[in-house]
Image: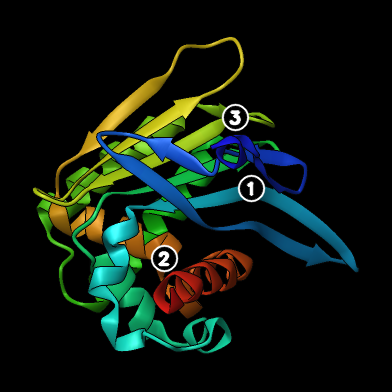
Amino acid sequence: MSSEMVMVMVDAIPFPPQITTTKPLALFGTGLTDVEVHFLQIKYNAIGIYLEETVVEHLGNWKGKEGSDLAEDDGFFEAVASAPVEKLIRVVIIKEIKGAMYGVQLEGGVRDRLAAVDKYEEEEEEALEKVSEFFQSKYLKPDSVITFHFSPAPLTAEISFVTAGKGEAKIKVENANVVEMMQKWYLGGSTAPSPSTVKSLAEGLAKKLAA
């Protein structure tokens, strides 16, 4: 269908409506990470959330709910993150940042979530350090792309980084606890770094649940 070729624009950054990994994943939500400083909105990243369409089979408890209600329901996002389907989070850099800074943010967010549920042991620390080291040497220029591809069985993540003039760099994360909390870092409802992405994802899934 020709409509599938129409890109979804997020602050002038194009996101394909579908990405095929081992199977087609649909774009369910988009947004930005940003901060307001002295009345100026500083945009850091554009985000696209891709999921298998079968994710709705695991969200039956929320059928018929409005997107605005789902956006306020952390239990709903817990169910989305826990659903045993493929997920892909595409992050496109808007404001350049050192990879080390991004890695520290990711490491801190995941570590705090693991510690809160008493799952931060030596194995998790080692896996997180490898992720942080992966970003350490990177420079996140505008239009660079970070992709988190989550596979459900067994629960693993592949992180890739692509920037102009360099080949793709990848790392695989096989610690299930770390992978779970990496999903929840972006899909964590009220604790996620991008409220606009959370709201968009809730609305996208509400439409699918209403179909």
| Residue 75 on image: x %, y % | 34, 85
According to the image, label 2 marks what residue?
A: 187
Q: Where is 51 relative to 56, above or below?
A: above
- Name which of mark 1 and mark 3 comes first in the sequence: 1
Disc number for residue 89: none
Pointer 1 or 2: first along the chain: 1
Residue assigned mark 1 = 45
The residue identified by callout 3 is: 144
Q: Quadrant of residue 15?
A: top right
Q: Nearer the viewer, residue 82 or 210?
A: 210
**Kind of residue indicated by mark 1:** Asn
- Residue sitting nearer the eye, 80 or 135: 80
- Residue 38: image location, x then y, percent: 90, 67
The Cα atoms of the two marked residues, 3 and 2, are separated by: 21 Å
The secondary structure type at the circle numbered 2 is: helix
Q: Quadrant of the C terminus?
A: bottom left
Residue at image location 17% in from the left, 59% down from the top: 177
The residue lying at 50 percent from left, 26 percent from top is 138
